[in-house]
Amino acid sequence: MLVVIAEVLARVANSILFVLLTWRLGEMEASRYTLGFTFALFLIQFSLGGLDQLLTREVSKAPNRGGIILGTFLLARCISSLLLYMALIAWIAGPFGYDSATNQIVLIVGATFIPDSLTALCQAFLIARDRVAYVTLLGALTGVFKLILGFAAIWLGGGALIAAIIVLMTSCISLLFHVTLITTRFTSLSISLEPAFLVEHARSEWPLLLIAILTTLEGTIDAILLSRRIGTLEVGVYAASMLFLNALMIVPAAFRQIILPEITVRYATQRERAFDVYTQSARALLIVTLLLSASLTVNADQIVPIVYRDHFSSAIPVLQILIWSFVFTTLLVPGGRLMLAAGRQAMFVPLLIGSLSLNVVLNLWLQPSLGAIGAAVARVSSSALMLALSFMCVQRIIYRWHVMPVLIGPLVATLTMIAVNVGLRWVGVQWIVALGISWLVYAGLIVILRAVSAAELRRLRDLLLQRIAPLTPP
């Protein structure tokens, strides 16, 4: 249990520092800090994004070549990351920069994408070798270390600049730990410059890279446009609502890493079992995401003031809209993993282009009048379109299943839960009590409507336990 708590803290450490900056120094300083992370997230996928997913797949199939694959991938990503960071310096130092204080923070926080992108490759290697424990423990240790140092620095009067330096330092330490672990416990690293090796993996990488770039553009273009068209503070408002979404994105991130090796192996040897994992995962994720999104929508007016101590009150309506992208983005995971296992990842490229185009058009149209609310509408609309298009592709090309019976039960349970929660609060019941009662109603309806069977839950539980079994290092 302590490991799970530590892992959660590690993943949300940057968000917690954002909250602390808001408490101690106000909205503008926190907004500068989060703008730096926007650029880091923007650049990390341009640095051969998708390479970590490719590494997981390749090392799962050929563990004996893991050292060569990891070493070569690390070199390629290191070179691309350094080139991208030079481009960021030129961009910020040129006519597209911000005020000097913001520029400093953006350049320091933005630099974290270099060690973080290399660490992601090391984590992908460990996951492929069924050593999720090491990813969990190292991520937890460095994340908690970052949180403790950042908390102390901010509480003692340090600003966003000090927090940015701490974040960069801990990212570098995390990379050092991961490389040391792999080279001492698993394999030495080597580099292959054989043309056949490079061409083979370049062909597999390019659609993943395009997917990563398009996904990143869709995930960051709204904040970057806000910073250019409205201002840094509006980015902070948007980030204040995104904090909740990012915390919940632990669910699809963890699920993605758990089921990718399983679906990859099963698709090659027991294809029906891979389809079974796909449908069970989609059903479970639908139930969980609807519950969490509806709960935050109804109670955002209570939760946001608690988290930010009455700062960022304008983030409440943004969160109530934005949180629904969590449902659509999470439900993309099972189908996306199935498409990757089937070697159909190139199908995602035109889908992402369509989704990104809708996102950009809606942002350009809605941001001038609605600001962060317009950005939230654009994000939800584009993620819904992406889910619909990808689901249709899976249905037509890979595996067809009847989804309507799966949707009806959770949707009815969600609408009933919202009505109960709103009704109880309207008659004066304290919000946390109303939320608890509405959750019980939701769970009861899921069982009554047979939205998921006990057998399916047991099979999914067994799968997750099987994949998480390596949490105890040998």
Image (spheres, rainbow, N blue to C red):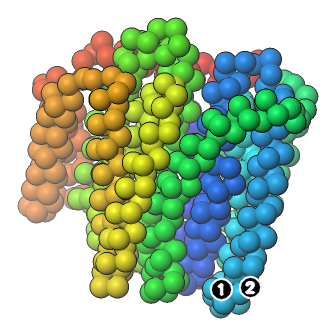
Residue located at (91% from left, 28% from top):
188
Residue located at (66% from left, 90% from top):
95
Mark sitting on residue 134: none
What secondary structure is marked by label 1? loop
Residue located at (41% from left, 32% from top):
334
Total numbered labels = 2
Pick the quarter of the image with the C terminus: top right
Q: Amino acid at mark 2?
A: Ala
Distance (Cα) linking label 2 and label 1: 6 Å
Residue 322 lies, with reference to residue 315, above or below; the image says: above
Looking at the image, residue 261 sits to the left or right of residue 169; the answer is left
Sort mark 1 into few (<14), some (14-19) or many (20+) by Cα contacts within 10 Å.
some
- Splitting the image into 4 quarters, where does residue 15 fall? bottom right
According to the picture, the residue beneath numbered tag 2 turns out to be 93
Sort mark 2 into few (<14), some (14-19) or many (20+) by Cα contacts within 10 Å.
some
Marks 2,1: beta carbons within 8 A: yes
Between 17 and 226, the one lying in front of the other is 226
Looking at the image, residue 7 sits to the left or right of residue 283; the answer is right
What secondary structure is marked by label 2? helix
x, y percent for residue 385: 30, 52
- Splitting the image into 4 quarters, where does residue 237 fall? bottom left
Between 63 and 407, the one lying in front of the other is 63
x, y percent for residue 319: 34, 65
x, y percent for residue 151: 67, 65
Residue 460 in view, yes or no: no
According to the picture, the residue beneath numbered tag 1 turns out to be 97
Looking at the image, residue 354 sits to the left or right of residue 159; the answer is left
Residue located at (73% from left, 64% from top):
84
- Splitting the image into 4 quarters, where does residue 428 fall? bottom left
Pick the quarter of the image with the N terminus: top right
Between 286 and 363, the one lying in front of the other is 363
Q: Amino acid at mark 1?
A: Gly
